[in-house]
């Protein structure tokens, strides 16, 4: 089965997720610049989540690029990933509107953690179909980033109840780790 | 006529339907975890509807895969299906916000029932165009699932007025029946 | 220049227009079926607008199918059409929420009238590029429907201030006239 | 790496941005035409932003058309552009709802200025990958429009605090400058 529609559907869902977050940047009441001040934490949360969804789109793009074809299991593993990512806008809003209070900052890590798990599951489902010697399997190698991210989320979630800024710093750290696109797959593709 | 744009448009509409449902997961007031409690039924409704739209996308993907080309009648049968699916978010919200009260739980079954009928009609329209011996017609065979689902919805809708949890259980049951992607078409394709 | 992205962008915008209208089917307050009653005119407006956008998507699909390539003028004529169609959801809501009151019912005709004009302009721009002997020009022929629709809208808009139901009936009539997909192009394509 | 998904994702995001702006054309309270009057500045802002997003889509279309392939840096430069464009709807609403008051009118220029910078950065990233002799580099030439627009925005933003209409006139002027699609690339393509 071709992968075209899986890519198109994922692009559509990710494009909507990344864009509906901006709907929460609600028009401030009042017409002077001071009216924008309460929007600052909402804006910062938006920037962080925009980068996260951008990273997922980017890596999804690279992963599917190295995938010759898809089956039913891959379609569902992909929907599972999109499900957790679809919760990112709601978590972003809650964190932003409460100015990085402990519980919302902790909860923000939950869809990120589950999406990291879902991404790993999708990778495994693709490798299971195309074999341990497939292009993707080779490109992944040790997958340090993929193993490190969930650990950092698991530290960040409880840490948010102690000091929310620690959780925030860890979320930014994971984003920075991933911001560099996955050169492993680009390299593996170039060497074929 | 090519089927590319029908697939692209359907992907777009389904991607939007599946994503706007999350807009109802409205940011709770208050910044502690207890503020999330009233969201639980809304969240559960969202999960169920996400799975339903995922099933439709999946089966739509498989069905169109087995369809060589489309005509005007197929375009309209497809829009008819998308119409009923577009009502799922509103029905989901009403059910979730009223914590599975009888009338909203009954009403949730109506777009599902009509979408099942519309899907059957779309199948028939495709088979009518490509013949009883076409790949899709063979793959469908007896179509047990397609016949069982509307019956279960027709039981669930009145049952919701007696005991809403019976309707809820039946909706979950239909989802489980379909969750397995349509291997009939995958098999028929593999055997060609 | 290829027409792929023009089709993809138009599909995206039309898919969003057709789906965001459903956001106005706001979850009713109250959990019994009577709570749905004020939604009936909103629902009927939604059905009518869904059919209109469906007709535009369908005819757009057919027209682009008969168009070999696009240029800058066609891109802008297409955006102009999408602009007027993007106003349909707002006009739909106003008409539905005011239960087909005169002014909202009249105003509903304005984006429809302008979209009909924009569609005609887009057709002309395509024919201007590909010549009077092109497939599209031949398929259009006298274009009776295209000439009749704006006249009916021009009658409906003032009529709404006298008797809103006359305007409503005319809007439904235009939809019925177009509901049959444009067989002219299908025929012209089949005869090549 | 192919550019198909970058185009599809950008089309999706731009289609959503251009369409969600219309959600701010909120259904007026009251059922006579006078109820539409406060919507006029909102509508005018919508028209201006629709044209701006249309221009970006159009030029993006042309630029990618002249781009043979993409890499990780281009993907991120493109996401950076989409980020600033995603802020246009919020800025549009603020300006429209405050009837072109000084601060909102100034702020409207900020995402436009940043998007102009992001577009220039994306161009540079593509040219850096494909070389100074590439089709795009030749087509761009002196890039007068690209250099003029940020200067006009930089004048408009402080001017809004003195006389908002000066800023408004400058925003309209930049739109008019760009409304003519980028014939440089069409010409360069035609001459190959």
Image (cartoon, coloured by chain):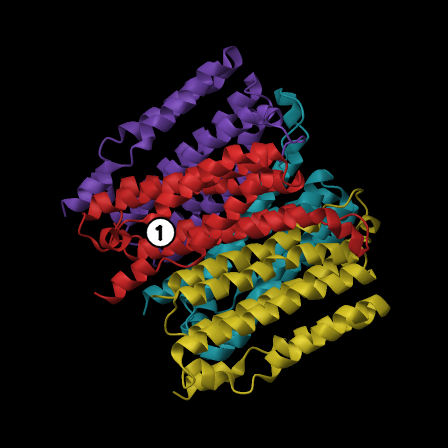
Chain colours: A yellow, B red, C purple, D cyan
Most distant residue in the right direction: A162
Left/right placement of residue B128 relative to residue C80 reads: left
Query: Is C175 drawn above or below residue D91 in the view shown?
Result: above
Q: x%, y% of residue B108?
A: 54, 38
Q: Quadrant of residue A95?
A: bottom right
> Pointer 1: residues within 10 angstroms few (<14), some, or many (20+)?
some
Q: Where does label 1 land, which residue?
A: B5
Q: Chain of mark 1?
A: B
Left/right placement of residue D105 relative to residue D125 reads: right
**Could one spot residue B4 in this view of the protein?**
yes
Identify which residue, C136 or D101, lies in the foreground: C136
Residue at position x 33%, y 66% from top? Answer: A1
Residue at position x 23%, y 54% from top? Answer: B138
Identify which residue, B179 or A139, lies in the foreground: B179
Most distant residue in the left direction: C191
**Could one spot residue D60 in this view of the protein?**
no
Left/right placement of residue C123 relative to residue C32 reads: left
Identify which residue, B163 or D179, lies in the foreground: B163
Residue at position x 32%, y 27% from top? Answer: C177
Left/right placement of residue B44 relative to residue D98 reads: left
Q: x%, y% of residue B44?
A: 62, 50
- Quarter of the picture containing the C terminus of chain B is bottom left
Q: x%, y% of residue C143?
A: 27, 31
Q: Quadrant of residue A91?
A: bottom right
Total number of numbered discs in the rendering = 1
């Amino acid at each position: 089965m071709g992968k075209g529609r899986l890519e198109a559907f994922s692009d559509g869902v990710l494009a909507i997720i990344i864009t509906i977050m901006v709907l929460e940047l609600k028009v401030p009441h009042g017409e002077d610049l001071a009216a924008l001040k309460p929007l600052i934490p909402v804006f910062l949360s938006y920037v962080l989540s925009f980068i996260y969804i951008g990273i997922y789109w980017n890596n999804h793009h690279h992963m599917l690029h190295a995938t010759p074809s898809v089956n039913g299991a891959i379609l569902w593993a992909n929907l599972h990933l999109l499900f957790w990512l679809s919760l990112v806008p709601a978590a972003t809003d809650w964190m932003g509107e409460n100015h990085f209070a402990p519980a919302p900052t902790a909860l923000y890590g939950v869809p990120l953690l589950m999406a990291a798990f879902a991404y790993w599951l999708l990778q495994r489902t693709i490798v299971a179909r195309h074999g341990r010697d497939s292009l993707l399997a080779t490109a992944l190698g040790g997958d340090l980033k993929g193993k490190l991210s969930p650990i950092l989320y698991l530290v960040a979630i409880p840490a948010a109840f102690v000091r929310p800024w620690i959780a925030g710093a860890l979320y930014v750290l994971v984003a920075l780790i991933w911001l560099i696109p996955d050169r492993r797959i680009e390299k593996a593709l170039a060497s074929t």
